Amino acid sequence: MRAASNPICILRAVVLLLFALSFTTERIEAATLPSGFTETRVATGLASPTAMTVAPDGRLFVCEQGGRLRVIRNGALLTQPFLTLSVNSSGERGLLGVAFDPNFESNSYIYVYYTTSSSPVHNRVSRFTASAANPDVVAAGSEQILIDLPSLSSATNHNGGAIHFGNDGYLYIAVGDNAAPSNAPLLTTTLGKVLRIASDGSIPADNPFVSQTTGINQAIWARGLRNPFNFAVDRASGRIHVNDVGQDSWEEVNHAIAGANFGWPATEGPNPAGVAGVRYPVYSYQNAGSNCAITGAAFYSPTTVTFPSAYVGRYFFGDYCGGFIRYASPTSYSTATGFATGISSLVDIQVANDGSLYYLARGGGELFRVQYTANLAPSITRNPMNVVVAVGQSANFEAAASGTAPLTYQWQRNGVNISGANQATYTIPSVIAGDNGASFRVVVSNAFGSATSSLATLTVTSNTAPVATIASPAANTTYRGGQVFTFSGSGSDAEEGTLPPSALTWRVDFHHDDHTHPHVLPTTGGTGTFSIANRGETSANVFYRVILTVRDSAGLTSTTSVDLRPLTSTVRLESNIAQAQLTLDGVPVVAPLEFVGVEGVVRSIGAVSPQTSGGASYDFASWSDGGAQTHEITTPTADTTYTALFQPTVTTTVFSETFETQTGWTLPSGANTASSGRWERGDPQATGSSGRAMQPTSCAGGTVNCMITGLAAGSSAGANDVDGGLTTIESPPIALPTSGTITLRFSFYLAHLNNASSADFFRVQVVGANGTPQSVFQRNGSASTIAAAWSSQTVNLTSFAGQTIRLRFVAADGSSASLIEAGVDAVSVTRQ
């Protein structure tokens, strides 16, 4: 996997606390914004934030991965969370999404998406009610579970998690594929989808796949997604954009509509082009270099516009590793323009009704507000903090300011300018005892004025930093997928001796290429365990880093780490036919294919059947390991070859109908509303109108009988054609095989005069296991004269494999005064 699946899954090269320093957090540089825009840090100290939303009254609600929903009121982060959930926060799991009910001001409903902590672990969407006495906290016992999603595999990534209400009043839910690409296109699972439900959890009757699905799968609104971590709804137009984090090459912005298939895993970004049925992204960019995952989604359509008018209607998005925010412009949204750079681990973007844009940075756990403030003098938005360090350690001071760019900085020590100290941060590389008590401040200036920060005092202590020691696992320990490791260690301090377990904080990061995924969130204690994932990330360019930080009573810290390296094997996929079409983890590949995998990691291999090679058709026969056509393998401990064996295709006829005899075709009740011209079995007549043949002179197969409308029309075609509605003929039951490619073939004609329209048509339907007719082919009428002429047509019915179906042929007269006639012959269903 080239790109990480969502912002919580791609913590980019985390800056560790070095040595024993101060009480300060990781340094966060101010973002670079267009001229006239400024940013203000609204909150800091958020623990692994994942998502946010703006309440109707302007409060900000921020999800922390560990299960707390934090509230920011009037620019202050409240100590008490609105809600604290028990969640499974392994990898990318946890509290991942939040939304307010459109009628929140009257019903106080808040919705969240989170991973349950109890077995079986799964993602859930629940509704909570804010307390009437204190709207900053949840009403006790108010949780109403709206939807429990499928149980998760051992893969901890690709959870999705964004939730928003559409302009239609329904709740839309973005769900990842659980690192199993084959889930994305299927209508038998909600994984890899956008779902649509009512605010009480019920499923809207007009969802696009209601007639093809059962249970919670009826909530599916769009499919073919890998990890849709963010999406947004344009409040002005109702348009929905869904971001999908890519794998090897592309990050996507998709314009979502009901019933859409966004193509994963058959496509990624614009490639390969021309895949039938795929709705390609309106915008995509490559995740090469510093880019790794698309994050953040917001349309600039606030109630009060404060940005320049050129920004109205723009779609803002960013990249977690790239650290940028860009915007795409209507109406096509096919190109993007840079807006901000230098953001530390962007996870979300929101636009408030007052016209401000907010962005959430996981790096440092900070929330920023972006405003348009042209021609404003600087204002200090973050003062430097006091620093306590030991002799020989470094000391860092940091400040932030808003105002019209460009801003210049000048740090002062004891009121005197420091030469060359002209950045938002100032660092003393190695302090000495004589630095004790020195004060530092910064003066920020622009063309419209200046502002001076408050003083920060440097305290140099004789106290020494503690020492962190990891006892296990040992450095460069090797691992296989599925293994469980114990971590243990200690902290010692020259002044305090052995530190208690409460002074030890552990974290485990999963490194992939040039970025990291959280594997174990910070936890306190002397020992613990963690499991190596055996599903999810399939790359071999990975390792785990176990990190221990110890803190003494004076606040000085020390950090150490050990790395666990993977054991790998080479797997080769081959076949007995040239250029065989196979799948690896659901993604199309061509044999022979060779890859390096981490031992113990579960992969899925499959064979496409039937397929063509060298001009001949082949069916899957077997795999060399005896597995099914598509089956899972555990990456072996030695180099291994898996061979897909094929045999020449044999075509079998499942059903055949020439209509020479009566075989059980019927006119179904309720589907025949035409007053004349209904389907009959017989020999067509040379019927015409306005010099054009409305019936051919014979059946398609040269036989005597076929199915014809208006059979008795004779020379009075206009009086005896299909009139006043539709006529439907239905086949006897047809039991379809469970595998192979199933094809319907038939001959038909649709004849009409130039007074026809699209309300006049010939249609083919399949009545499957759910009893609901599903259209699989249609030919519409038009404002031109079309004479009767037989033509052949094929329709793929493989999606109905294993079902007992009935075929329906429908002819409809929906236009006033139009003249319509149709015929069907030579119907067959085959399996290859």
Image (spheres, grey):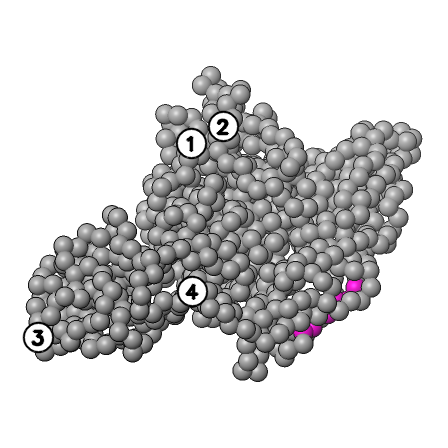
Q: Residue at x 61, y 58 (%)?
A: 3
Residue 730 found in image quarter: bottom left
Q: Nearer the viewer, mark 3 or mark 1?
A: 3
Query: Which region shows up in magenta?
Result: 569-575
Disc number for residue 200: 1
Q: Report the Cα–Cα distance between label 3 and label 2.
A: 67 Å
Q: Report the Cα–Cα distance between label 1 and label 2.
A: 8 Å
Measured as percent of width and height from the top left, residue 567 is found at 81, 59
Q: On the image, numbered disc 3 is attached to which residue?
A: 690
Q: Main secondary structure of the magenta part?
A: strand
Q: Nearer the viewer, mark 3 or mark 4?
A: 4
- Could one spot residue 795 in this view of the protein? yes
Q: Report the Cα–Cα distance between label 1 and label 4.
A: 46 Å
Q: On the image, numbered disc 2 is attached to which residue?
A: 144
Please identify the residue farthest to the top as the structure is shown: 133
Q: Report the Cα–Cα distance between label 3 and label 1.
A: 59 Å
Question: In the picture provided, is 759 more to the left or to the right than 493?
Answer: left
Judged from the image, the secondary structure of the residue bearing numbered disc 4 is strand
Answer few, some or many: residues within 10 Å of disc 1's Cα (few below 14, many 20 plus, some between 14 and 19). Answer: some
> For this rendering, which residue is in front, 367 or 4?
4
